[in-house]
Every structure is written in structure tokens, then in C-alpha cells.
Image (cartoon, rainbow, N blue to C red):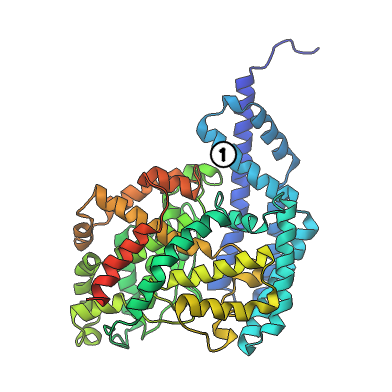
Amino acid sequence: MTSSISVDPSAQIDAAYAELIAHLKRSYTLDSVAGLLGWDEQVNLPPGAAGQRAEQHSVLADLAHAQASAPRLGELLAALEAGSGRLSPDQGAVVRQARRDYDRATKLPADFVREKAVQGSRGYHAWAKARAENDFAGYAPVLQKNLELARREAAYLGSGDAPYDAMIDNHDPGLTAAAIERLFTELKKELVPFARAIAASPVRAKADALRGFPLAEQRSFLREVTERLGFDYRRGRIDVSLHPFCSGGGDDVRMTTRFNVDEPLDSLFGSIHETGHGLYEQGLPSAHLGTALGTHAGMAVHESQSRLWENQVARSRGFWKFFEPRFRTLFPAQTAAVTSEELYLTVNSVAPTPIRVEADEITYNLHVILRFEIERRLFAGTLAVEDLPAAWNELSQELLNLSPASDREGVLQDVHWSGGAFGYFPSYALGNMIAAQLWYRVLSLRPGIEEDCARGDFTWLLGWLRENIHAQGRRLDALSLVRQVTGEELSPAPLMRYLRERYGKLYLK
Ligand code: ZN
């Protein structure tokens, strides 16, 4: 007998939505297991276990892909989109994000995904060898292949006529090359002459002022600082790895750092940077992990969180007013000959270098603009791979006023392109811009913020970020989020203002 009872459409939508959420949570859990294996690989894995770990990754990747591309998911999304009038705005955001992820999982053929993974690992090893041997010609075919894969990926996803936009969208949903170019062009105009003026200043931090810092005390200082900033060690931890990173999420955030007895500020600031990422992850609503409501708003916003704590907060006078006495207590002999002013100058030291990861806060943005220009030209077809070193060196001269001594110090220095990660670099400088714009918003709301820092009280700032950035998840893209929080369009002006106020005062007296 067929039922004559008509099913309430609202109840149908509710049921489909609940099933969607269960599905997304299972995907998130599978991804988080893979992430944990990745963390373990960089922190704990015995060297002989690499093969076994690769097998584990491969099985998990298959499971995750099957979950993310399940036909049932497609049916649920279709039903929810058809009844979208009955969805709340938050539910609408969840469905839009799920659709985006589902399309990625189903539009990219399995063969292509496998080919890209194999090429990524091959590319990494080819890059490491080429860099060690300063051999760009040996690396060029890898880049050529990665570009071709990137173009195919864009075509599968339906953005074949704008492949670079598709790459940027992978990391920063909603952003385009044209929008970034407008921002970078404006930034460059003021930043290039400012960086040159700073480079010409006779003021310099004493090189090697801080030497011989025992690791045990570095560890406890780092723990005290990051805990006071608000990192919750009941829901996260910090370990040592070759390259610092932050992974995981929710109640299990994993940060890493590295120590050097003669570079105590490197590990400190590296850890504060990762703490900024970690605070963001810990602040995402954990009830909504795996959905747009519990996911970060893209890499530019993520980077703004790490930069704000690392730069605006931890390089400020207020911050050091609070932490300097403790620093001196832990390291009395090492800091005896260093005045407060010298310490502050060392915290904010500048030095021109062709290497991005060693760059100071000012020139770092120029290193990013250089990479953006190169990527844009590569994807536009106006720059051939074999002409890359020459273009790189020319841009380096134009933007940084220096030429790398070799390709090893130039075009071969970064790992990103070896794995096909195009369109990622802009996030770093966009993050700096967003951080500065957020900081001036904070200052307008709480003019005494630096006194908070000087008392070691970061609760107001963290609370504000929690409410205005973290709790927002991915409801908005980076540009809309900045507009909502600061009341203004994203602009390079606050970053320039911040750099002038901090570095102009120290170096251009
Ligand atoms: Zn970062």
C-alpha cells in the first residue's frame, strides 16, 4: 500500500541537511587522520619507515576521496540546492562550501589526481637535487610539467580561461589575480622607495648580539610566552621539526618549532607565528568542524593571524616591556651586555637578503610580489620556463635592489612550485596587509592595546579576534571579511603606515 501522507518539505530539507553534516564530519575526520600522519612524519618518523608511511597515506587518500566524491553526497547537495529557500544563511554557506569541495572531488579524474601526486613527489626530489647542484636546467622540465598539470586542473574545474585564478582560488577562495595585482601595484609604489631608505640607514642592530642560549631555557621561555598569548596546551602541543609548521585543528592543534643556541629570536618568533595560526584553529567553532562554519577563511586570513601576533604584537615595545625582565632572568649572562634599546632593535632588525625566508618584515613583501609577477607571466604565457632565471634576477634588481649570486639563491630557493603549489605566495603579503588593517581597527576600538601588552594581558585582543575573525569560519571570503570587520576595503595603506611607524622611527631618525 502506498502512503497517502505527504512528507513535509521542510522535514525533508532538515533530514538532508543532517545527513550532509554527518557526511562532512566523516570527511573531516579522515582528513584529520591524514594530517596527523603528516605531522608524525615530520616530527617522529624513523627514517626506515618512509615506505610504510607512504602506504598508509595512500590508503587514507583513497578512503577520503571515496567519501568526498560519494554519489549520495551529490544527491544531498542537489536536494538542498533545490530547496535552498528553506535554508538559513549559515546552512546556505555550508551547502555552498560543500558543493565547491564536491565539485573538486568529482571533476578531477582519478588518473589526473594520481598523476599529480606522483609528479609532486618526483618534483620535490628533482627540486632538492637541482637546488643542491645549482642546476636550473635540470629542474626546468619539472616546472614545465607542473604548469601543464595546473592548466589541466583549471580546465577540469571549469576555469580553463583563467588558470592562474583557479590556482589562487585553491588557497584563497574569492580572490583573483586582477584584485591582487591592484593591491600589489599600489603597495610596491611606496614600499620600494621605503625599503631603499631603510637599507641606506646607518642604524643597524649589533650582529650576533645574542649568542649561546641554552635550549632548555629557550623552551621554557617559549612556553611561557605562547601560553600567555592564549594558546591552550590542553588542546594542542608544540614539538620540534626541521621546518616549523602548524597542523591539526579543533581540540588537537599541533605546532612545531626548531631551536638554535645562537638564534634565540628565530625560534621565539617562529613559534609566535605558528601560535597565531594555532590560536585561529583553536578559535574556529569546534561544533562545526568540517563545514564552512568551522573552517578558516583561506590562507591570506590564516596568515594575517600569524603575522598579527608575530609582528604587530610581539615586535612592539609593550610586549617587550612585559617579557624583557623574564628574558633577562632566564638568560642573565647572555643578555648582560645588551641594553634594552639594543634588544628592541635586534627584535626589529633589517638586512637585505635574496632569500625570502630570511627577509625582514619590510622586504618580505617585495619577495612575494616578485613571485606573484613571475607566476602571473608564466600563466599568461608571456614568460617561458627557460627564461625564468633571467626574469627572476631582473625583478630582484628592480624590487629588492640586489641580484642573487646564483640560481640557488634565486629562482631555485623555494619548494612551492616543485609540488605544483602555484598561487600560494600572494597569501603571505595579503596576510601582512590584513594584519595591519585589523591592527588599526583594534587600535581605534582599544587605544590602550599596547598597555595591555605591557601588562602581559592579551585577553581583550584574543577575545576580539575570536569573535570577529575566528568565529566567522568561512562564511565570508577574505575581502568581504576584512570589509565587515574594519568597515573598509582591503588596502596596502595600513601596512605602509605600520611599517613607517615601527621601522621609520627606528631607522630614519
Ligand atoms: Zn604562516
**Mark 1 sits near ligand 1, with its Cβ under 8 Å away:** no
Q: Quadrant of residue 79?
A: top right
Residue drawn at x 41%, y 45% as measured from the top left: 483
Which of 205 and 501 lies nearest the eye of the viewer? Answer: 501
Q: Is residue 346 above or below residue 379?
A: below
| x and y, in percent, of residue 204 in the image | 28, 84
Q: Is residue 121 left or right of residue 191?
A: right
> In the rendering, at what x and y percent does residue 335 appear?
23, 84
Q: Is 444 positioned to the left or the right of 482 in the image?
A: left
* Quadrant hosting residue 304: bottom left
Q: Nearer the viewer, residue 218 or 371?
A: 371
Q: Position of residue 422 (x, y in %)?
A: 62, 64
Q: Amino acid at mark 1?
A: Val
Figure check: 314 above or below 291: below
Q: Is residue 505 left or right of residue 41?
A: left
Where is 152 relative to 441, above or below? Answer: below
**Left of 78 or right of it: where is 357?**
left
Rendering coords of residue 311 (x, y %): 34, 66
Write the residue at 76% across / 62% down.
Answer: 114
Residue nearest the observer in this picture, 481 or 399: 399
Helix or strand or loop: what does disc 1 sit on?
Answer: helix
Q: How many numbered marks are there?
A: 1
Is residue 285 visible to us here? no
Q: Is residue 465 above or below residue 389?
A: above
Q: Work out which quarter of the rendered image holds the N terminus and state it.
A: top right
Q: At x 35% / y 72%, what residue is drawn?
A: 194
Q: How dense is the environment of label 1, judged by Cα within 10 Å: few (below 14), some, or many (20 and up)?
A: many
Which residue position is annotated with label 1? 94
Rendered-image quadrant of the C terminus: bottom left
Residue 322 seen: yes
Seen at 40% across and 43% down, the residue is 484
